[in-house]
Amino acid sequence: MVPSLDWFIYAFVRKEAVISSQIEGTQATLVDLLEYEAETQDRKPDEDVREVCNYLDALKYTRRQLGSPKGLPLSMRLFHEAHRRLLRGARGANRQPGEVRRSQNWIGGTRPGNAAFVPPPPEVVPALLGELERYLHADDTLPPLVRIGLAHVQFETIHPYLDGNGRIGRLLITLLLEHWKQLSAPLLYLSLYFKRHRAEYYRLLGQVRDNGDWEAWTDFFLEGVATIADEAVTTARDVFTLVSNDRERVLAASGASVIAARLLEQLPVHPVITITGVVKLLETTKPTAGKAVLHLESVGVLVETSGKRRDRTFAYKKYLDRLRAGTELEDR
């Protein structure tokens, strides 16, 4: 149905990274991330965008390892390396990146005695992770989607790190969906469902731990997979229709050029751009890049978003509006 799978891998991976980070309190949106990626001058991202970039780096690293014959297998060592990249240079960088915790942690409250959840003590965590790893490689008659849901709960319950457990636990879902051949690429941003139903998500995790209610959790998890899968299909159709219609308008408009058409084809994976960025992307001159941008702006494809007279930023706004659903902060 879609002309380029790269479009959707680019967009959906970033959407998952943003939402998974937001669940942990990161105050960065999809647009914040894309605007940073569009910057051509050297500048460091702020802390919130850094956390999202780190998540992208961790996902890229783990997929590359699993896809290479010489890479790390699906293992706790792989997740430790992902965790190291997740916390690099960000909040939590001093909380043993890539290492299993050596002290007790807890969720909610000021101490274990009044906490909402107290994970296993540190001395048993290595053995528990070993059991989880064996389960991931074991033969099991349960459907893969069910097993993925169970593995997520178990990882979250072990809570093996001092920070970043939630993001790695959701990364586990993304990797298993692809590694166990439920998807050909990371196109399911399940964190959006968890964000929408955050209270229920945490309640059901607690029900498993307190009462062994795996069935209620599995119902919730599978409902989330079905809901987000349907939404992803709808988004793909909408985006395909949008880009197809815009292509016709751009080519039919007076003043259309080959560079403008080439730029339109790049917008789904570069939905926020600068003229300097277009020069590098299309390997052209600044005047030619400027004319292409202005042409796409004149036909309503691009919208100027920076409000500046120089070093302006442009966005493929209608495309972004379809992708950004669920990624905005509640107070924005």
Image (cartoon, rainbow, N blue to C red):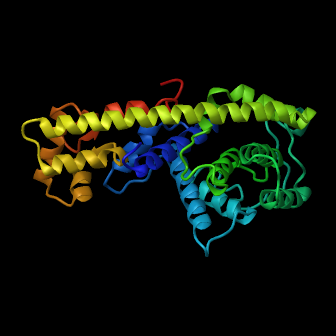
Residue 102 in picture, x, y percent from top left? 83, 58
Residue 86 in picture, x, y percent from top left? 61, 55
Residue at x 75%, y 51% (from the top left corner): 162
Task: Specify whether residue 131 is in view.
Answer: yes
Of 258 and 312, the residue lying toward us? 258
Q: Is residue 252 above or below residue 6?
A: above
Q: Is residue 18 above or below residue 278?
A: above
Q: Residue furthest top?
A: 331
In the rendered image, the quadrant that contains the N terminus is top left
Of 93 and 284, the residue lying toward us? 284
Residue at x 21%, y 56% (from the top left corner): 279
Of 319 and 26, the residue lying toward us? 319
Q: Is residue 236 left or right of residue 56?
A: left
Residue 243 in picture, x, y percent from top left? 30, 38
Q: Count the marks.
A: 0
Of 204 and 217, the residue lying toward us? 217
Q: Is residue 254 left or right of residue 190?
A: left
Residue at x 66%, y 63% (from the top left corner): 81
